[in-house]
């Protein structure tokens, strides 16, 4: 549970690490990659006797496949290799690997063979790795279509072919793996956008390279160990004033529920007092489901809050704009979501005030909101989620959580994280409001902003994962259910954090 954060590198980072590791590498990195890939194939086919099919491409990813094939053959495993390239164009290492495969008695086919009657024991994609430079075309797209249609386990070597290792975009066509064995370190493309749909279960083998000794991590996969120090039991001698005054402003006509969901999430994650300012003058005076929330006029909430979230159901009316004008200059941490972001995107003056804030700011856009803020659109944001999040962090001097598959958290000083909890059942109304409430609650309880945001993002997904394991969702999961589950997961984390690590026990 508190395993260390895992480093993530873009393609240029991996290349730099490889350059530094290569001179000392004996056996070569490719030899090591092929060996661990063969080990993985053996593991995946424990109860599946039969032939392993390896599709090899025109670069070093194909070279890994040839080494893997040779290793499997030496272990007396039936292997068939199909090579989609020209021997004379192979890079030197890959060509040597092909020759060694032939010397060991292996053969290469130039087309994908029909599967045997009993099917392949395992299908291996060693077509393209991190050297993919453009969308795939025929014949590779045909190869990938054929491979994707085959039943049984499918293993991608380093990264599924056709997936952009930096962005997670499927370029033209991408292999759909059940398992991916990635080398040296994680790549962002495995974890965000189309990555999780194509990579399946991801395992990293470092090939006896210590990447962080050769290049500081560019990004990190978000783990509870990153905020463990704040997961502490409460002292007995406390009162509600010890846990902060959280404000939520939103809930315009027709959208009352958004502000209430955020308020309920803040309450159940432990904020001391929660003031909810409803923009709708006809809103109820009390949340009958959660009477602990104090529903007040928004102007009252502005004064009462020690940390303020603006946006859940805020609306785009002039009144909302005026509320933003009053809130943005406040010297308290602000969490801006939903319509608060849309108002800023529409109004250059609000944007300037937001970017110039002295107190800390968190923005939690989904891709369409991020697109509006950047003057682009959701598709451009999705084409480069890391770049978009980093761009927003710089522009607004703020912490950003760019939501979606593999939420990207970015800080203004260029650091970034990718979160891997959560599932598609979370694509439902009110889920963002709940995240806003969770972050607000942790900040109210005096968590440092960065820890509060990454913890809330991770918790939000972990709560939904827990519910799915218990049979609640993924489909039909409601945001309100996630609030209760988040409370349970958070309290369990605190108990686990207090348990000594095995090595120190
Ligand atoms: N460089 C190293 O030291 C190591 C590399 N390794 C493996 O090598 C891979 C990277 O190798 P490469 O840099 O050779 O790259 P790839 O094997 O991913 O592919 C490069 C080849 O594909 C071609 N290509 C790129 N995009 C194409 C497209 N859309 N359509 C058709 N052809 C296209 C390129 O012209 C080049 O010939 C890694 O992913 C990993 O699997 C491992 O062996 C570990 C060590
Ligand atoms: K591959």
Image (spheres, rainbow, N blue to C red):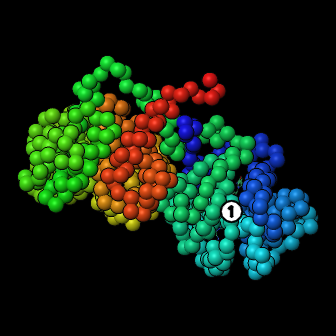
Can you identify the residue that label 1 sits on?
Answer: 155
- Which residue is at 62% across, 47% downward? 185
Tally of numbered discs: 1
* Quadrant showing the C terminus: top right
Q: Position of residue 473 (x, y in %)?
A: 43, 59
Q: Position of residue 134 (x, y in %)?
A: 56, 69
The extreme top residue here reads 237
Horizontal side of 48 relative to 402 (left or right) equals right
Q: Position of residue 397 (x, y in %)?
A: 32, 42
Q: Is residue 442 above or below residue 103?
A: above
Horizontal side of 208 relative to 301 (left or right) equals right
- Which residue is at 36% across, 64% downward? 378
- Which residue is at 30% across, 44% downward? 265
Horizontal side of 212 relative to 248 (left or right) equals right
> Depth check: 492 or 448 in front?
492
Cβ at disc 1 under 8 Å from ligand 2: no
**In this view of the protein, can residue 385 be seen by the observer?**
no
The extreme left residue here reads 281
Q: Quadrant of ligand 1?
A: bottom right
> Depth check: 379 or 261 in front?
261
**In this view of the protein, can residue 112 be seen by the observer?**
yes
Q: Position of residue 278 (x, y in %)?
A: 14, 49
> Depth check: 108 or 285 in front?
285
Q: Residues within 10 Å of mark 1 (few under 14, many from 20)?
A: many
Q: Is residue 326 above or below residue 124?
A: above
Secondary structure beneath disc 1?
strand
* Quadrant showing the N terminus: top right
Horizontal side of 306 relative to 173 (left or right) equals left
- Which residue is at 11% across, 53% downward? 283
């Amino acid at each position: 549970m508190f395993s260390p954060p895992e480093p993530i590198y873009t393609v240029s980072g991996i290349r730099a690490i490889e350059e530094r590791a290569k001179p000392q590498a004996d056996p070569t990195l490719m030899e090591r990659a092929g060996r661990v890939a063969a080990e993985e194939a053996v593991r995946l086919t424990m109860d599946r006797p039969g032939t392993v099919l390896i599709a090899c491409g025109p670069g070093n990813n194909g070279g890994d496949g040839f080494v893997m094939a040779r290793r499997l053959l030496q272990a007396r495993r039936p292997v068939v290799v199909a090579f989609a390239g020209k021997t004379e164009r192979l890079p030197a290492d890959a060509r040597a690997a092909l020759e060694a495969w032939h010397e060991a008695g292996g053969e290469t086919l130039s087309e994908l063979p029909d599967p045997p009657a009993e099917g392949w024991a395992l299908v291996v994609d060693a077509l393209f790795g991190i050297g993919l430079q453009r969308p795939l075309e025929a014949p590779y797209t045909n190869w990938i279509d054929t491979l994707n249609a085959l039943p049984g386990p499918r293993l991608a070597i380093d990264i599924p072919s056709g997936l952009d290792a930096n962005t997670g975009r499927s370029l033209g066509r991408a292999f759909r793996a059940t398992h991916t064995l990635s080398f040296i370190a994680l790549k962002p493309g495995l974890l965000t956008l189309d990555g999780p749909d194509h990579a399946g279960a991801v395992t990293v083998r470092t090939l006896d390279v210590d990447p962080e000794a050769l290049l500081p991590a560019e990004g990190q996969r978000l783990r509870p160990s990153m905020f463990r120090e704040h997961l502490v039991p409460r002292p007995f001698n406390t009162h509600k004033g010890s846990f902060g005054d959280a404000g939520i402003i939103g809930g315009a006509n027709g959208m009352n529920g958004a502000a209430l969901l955020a308020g309920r999430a803040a309450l159940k994650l432990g904020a001391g007092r929660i003031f909810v300012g409803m923009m709708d003058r006809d809103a109820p005076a009390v949340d009958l489901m959660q009477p602990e929330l104090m529903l007040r006029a928004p102007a009252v909430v502005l004064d009462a809050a020690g940390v303020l979230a603006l946006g859940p159901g805020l609306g785009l009316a002039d009144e909302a704009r005026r509320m933003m004008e009053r809130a943005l200059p406040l010297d308290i941490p602000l969490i801006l979501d939903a319509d608060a972001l849309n108002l800023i995107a529409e109004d250059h003056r609000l944007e300037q005030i937001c970017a110039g804030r002295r107190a800390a700011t968190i923005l939690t856009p989904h891709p369409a909101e991020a697109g509006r803020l950047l003057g682009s659109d959701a598709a451009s944001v999705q084409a480069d989620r890391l770049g978009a999040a980093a761009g927003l962090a710089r522009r607004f001097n703020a912490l950003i959580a760019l939501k979606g598959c593999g939420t990207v958290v970015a800080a203004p000083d260029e650091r970034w994280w990718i979160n891997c909890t959560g599932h598609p059942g979370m694509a439902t109304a009110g889920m963002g409001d709940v995240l806003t409430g969770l972050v607000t609650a942790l900040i109210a309880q005096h968590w440092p902003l960065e820890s509060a945001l990454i913890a809330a993002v991770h918790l939000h997904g972990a709560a939904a994962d827990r519910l799915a394991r218990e049979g609640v969702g993924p489909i039909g999961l409601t945001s309100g259910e996630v609030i209760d589950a988040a409370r349970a997961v958070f309290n369990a984390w605190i108990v686990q954090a207090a348990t000594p690590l095995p090595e120190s026990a």
